[in-house]
Every structure is written in structure tokens, then in C-alpha cells.
Image: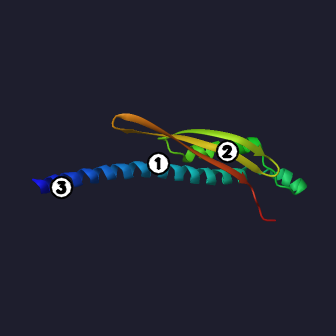
Amino acid sequence: MKESLWGYIVIILGVTSIVFIYFFQTITNTDQQNYTLLRETTESAMYDSIDEAYYQKYGVIKINTEKFVENFTRRFASNASLSNTYIIEIYDVSEMPPKVSLIVKSTKSTSITNEKVDFEISNKIDAILETPY
């Protein structure tokens, strides 16, 4: 009887540890995916929003604010996970020199013991467009 009780305890601890590992892994993966998506999308949107006519005329790189916001939201929306809710806050877009500051907040919810738990994951990026001359 003692040996079978220890067997049940080991099985219960194993299942509990697997549940905790899965839970924290989903939160960590969500954070890493959001950061990578934010970084790549910001860089691509900045390159897409370079004002080429201004560069040809004055030789200085400048981005268009409206074009950046449009490209960023389009690219982010096409690659974001549909299971999360996102809030995009663009704080600063400097046209010359090209610099942007933004935060993407996502909400991840899970239920443990019939209680809904919400996590807000925030990723902030300050990006400066650097190009070789």
C-alpha cells in the first residue's frame, strides 16, 4: 500500500509540473514572438516610409509619419496572432533624423482552477534608422 501511494504522489506531481511548464512556456513564447514581430515590423515600416523625393533633392534621409503608421499597422496586423488582443501606442515619430518610439501591449488570458487570469505583456521599442553612406 505504501509503494502505490508513493506512485500516485509521483504521478500527481508530474502532471502538476507539466501544467506549470506549459503555462509559463506559453507566456514566454508570446512575449518573445511579440518582441521579434515588433522589431522586424518597425524596421521594415521605417524603410518603406523613406521619403525618396526629399532624399534625391537634399541628400538627407527623412521618413513620412503617415506612411510609417500605415505600413506598421498593416504589417503588424498581417503577422500578429489572432488569439491575442493588441493595443499599439505610437508615442514619437521624428521625421528627421528617422526615429520612432512605440509600445505594443497584448493580453493573454488563461484559466487555472476555473478562474480566468489575464496577463498584459508590454513590449517597447525605440528605433533609429541608420543607413550606410
On the picture, is 115 further left or further right than 72? left
CA separation in Å, label 3 and label 2: 52 Å
Label 2 residue SS:
strand
- Residue 7, disc: 3
Q: Which of marks 3 and 2 is nearer the N terminus?
A: 3
**What residue type is disc 1 on?**
Ile
The residue beneath circle 2 is 102
From the image, which quarter does the C terminus lie in?
bottom right
Label 2 CA crowd tier, 10 Å (few <14, some 14–19, many 20+): some
The residue under the point 63% across, 53% down is 39
Give percent across and percent down for residue 31.
Answer: 52, 50
Q: How is the image coloured?
A: rainbow
The residue beneath circle 1 is 27
Front residue of 112/126: it is: 112
Up the image or down, 20 lies above or below 85; here it is below
Front residue of 83/91: it is: 91
